[in-house]
């Protein structure tokens, strides 16, 4: 098991680490079959592509919704600035709604050493770890990314699943908690409120990724999400099922909970910290539940058979300039992983200079909760139980 300093920064949306990595190597097919893919590990020496960055000034990047400042805002877009500075055209697509859903899109290609049509994508710690272990991700050339080595915050530098950041670099990070609409409902300050208050019935969503939601369900049982038993997990699943069966929970979502909040169909939900800034209006409030909160990062990676890796490395390096990082964070309000970005924030949003959702200190990040490492058998079992509740 990694020491506590390593474990502290290995979640979004949760993380499989430590024992689970050896389980991937020994029994990965069992875990992958739970996601609809088996025998997916590849030999990277037999799955290589020629980088065409010198002759093709382009790249294709898949990311989460609401994660970049407007890409067509003339003379104000960070992406436009990158394209003008480098001559590289970026085909940017916001088609990552949750980790498992995106995995299902690309696993058939990556497990058979075929191109996904993407040069880069950003996925959460635990899914990044899975793909790296499966041999699906190309090693990055840090000589092309001096800003990363100079400016990546120490807290994010050495995750146990990629300790030298050979394969991944954080795009943004964040926290998992609760968002509520203060125009439509009284403050919602705990996960217990979310699942029990009569005024919220049928107007609540929780997240579709098992680790996200089960962290809080375990906390409600008085269990430790970083060290729990199968009996405690089953009890937590039982409480989640009761909330679904009673009609308290409207549905399980990825980033699309934003649409429900905007429409008023949902008045409170489990959510990610940065998204509240994209909702518009002061009525949408994001809070850390009284039970605790999770911390995570989404990581840029280059998949096998991508043909513009050097161009991606230029993109990553561009976004690790503190001023560019500040401009990006001023728009999406996620945790910024870039050193000294706070020094430039006043140029873009004076109100965000000391915002703890963007620039939390290490003590606050250390307080975030991780999900216990799982071996392949546990992962399959726990995911199956969660899927059964989701499907009703």
Image (spheres, rainbow, N blue to C red):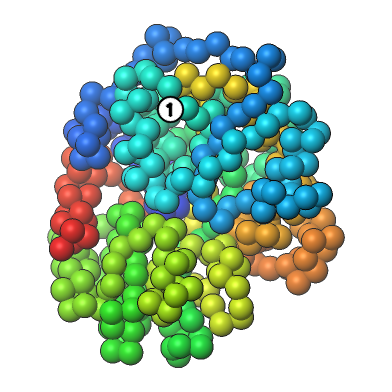
Q: Nearer the viewer, residue 382 or 369?
A: 382
SS state under label 1: loop
> In the rendered image of this protein, does residue 115 appear above or below residue 365?
above
- In this rendering, does residue 213 appear at all? no
State the count of labels.
Answer: 1
Counting other residues with Cα less than 10 Å from the Cα at mark 1, is it few (<14), some (14-19), or many (20 or more)? Answer: some
Residue at 35% over, 37% down: 105
> In the rendered image of this protein, does residue 136 appear above or below residue 252?
above
Q: Nearer the viewer, residue 359 or 363?
A: 359
Q: Position of residue 165 (x, y in %)?
A: 57, 32
Q: Position of residue 90 (x, y in %)?
A: 64, 35
Give residue 211's quadrant in the image: bottom left
> In the rendered image of this protein, does residue 194 appear above or below residue 223?
below
Q: Position of residue 150 (x, y in %)?
A: 74, 36
Left or right: residue 352 versus residue 2 is right
Left or right: residue 221 versus residue 188 is left
Residue at 44% over, 88% down: 185
Left or right: residue 12 versus residue 109 is right
Left or right: residue 111 versus residue 31 is right
Residue at 68% over, 68% down: 355
Q: Quadrant of the N terminus?
A: top left
| Residue identified by numbered label 1 | 116
Q: Quadrant of the C terminus?
A: bottom left
Residue at 28% over, 72% down: 250
- In this rendering, does residue 273 appear at all? yes
Q: Position of residue 314 (x, y in %)?
A: 70, 29
């Amino acid at each position: 098991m990694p020491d506590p300093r390593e474990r502290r920064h290995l979640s979004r949306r949760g993380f499989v680490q430590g024992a689970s990595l050896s389980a991937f190597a020994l029994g990965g097919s069992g875990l992958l079959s739970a996601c609809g893919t088996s025998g997916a590990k590849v030999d990277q020496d037999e799955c290589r592509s020629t980088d065409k960055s010198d002759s093709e000034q382009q790249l294709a990047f898949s990311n989460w919704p609401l994660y970049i400042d407007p890409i067509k805002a003339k003379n104000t877009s960070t992406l436009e600035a990158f394209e003008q500075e480098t001559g590289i055209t970026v085909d940017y697509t916001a088609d990552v709604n949750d980790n498992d859903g995106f995995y299902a899109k690309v696993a058939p290609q990556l497990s058979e050493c075929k191109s996904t049509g993407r040069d880069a994508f950003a996925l959460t710690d635990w899914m990044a770890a899975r793909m790296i272990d499966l041999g699906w991700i190309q090693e990055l050339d840090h000589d092309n990314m001096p800003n990363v080595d100079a400016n990546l915050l120490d807290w994010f530098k050495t995750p146990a699943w990629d300790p030298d950041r050979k394969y991944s670099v954080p795009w943004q990070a964040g926290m998992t908690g609760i968002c509520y609409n203060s125009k439509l409902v009284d403050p919602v300050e705990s996960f217990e409120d979310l699942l029990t208050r009569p005024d919220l019935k049928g107007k609540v969503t929780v997240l579709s990724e098992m680790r996200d939601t089960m962290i809080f369900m375990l906390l409600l049982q008085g269990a430790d999400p970083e060290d729990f038993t199968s009996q405690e997990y089953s009890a937590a699943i039982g409480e989640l099922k009761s909330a679904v069966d009673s009609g308290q929970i409207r549905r399980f979502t990825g980033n699309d909970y934003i649409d429900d909040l905007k429409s008023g169909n949902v008045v409170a939900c489990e959510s990610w910290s940065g998204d509240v800034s994209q909702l518009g209006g002061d009525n949408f409030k994001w809070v850390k539940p009284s039970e605790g909160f999770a911390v995570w990062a989404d990581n840029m990676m280059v998949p096998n058979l991508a043909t513009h890796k050097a161009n991606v490395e230029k993109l990553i390096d561009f976004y690790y300039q503190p001023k560019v990082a500040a401009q990006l964070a001023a728009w999406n309000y996620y945790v910024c992983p870039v050193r000294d970005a706070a020094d430039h924030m006043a140029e873009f949003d004076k109100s965000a200079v000391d915002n703890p959702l963007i620039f939390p200190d290490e003590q606050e990040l250390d307080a975030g909760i991780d999900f216990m490492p799982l071996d392949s058998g546990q992962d399959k079992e726990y995911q199956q139980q969660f899927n059964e509740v989701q499907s009703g």
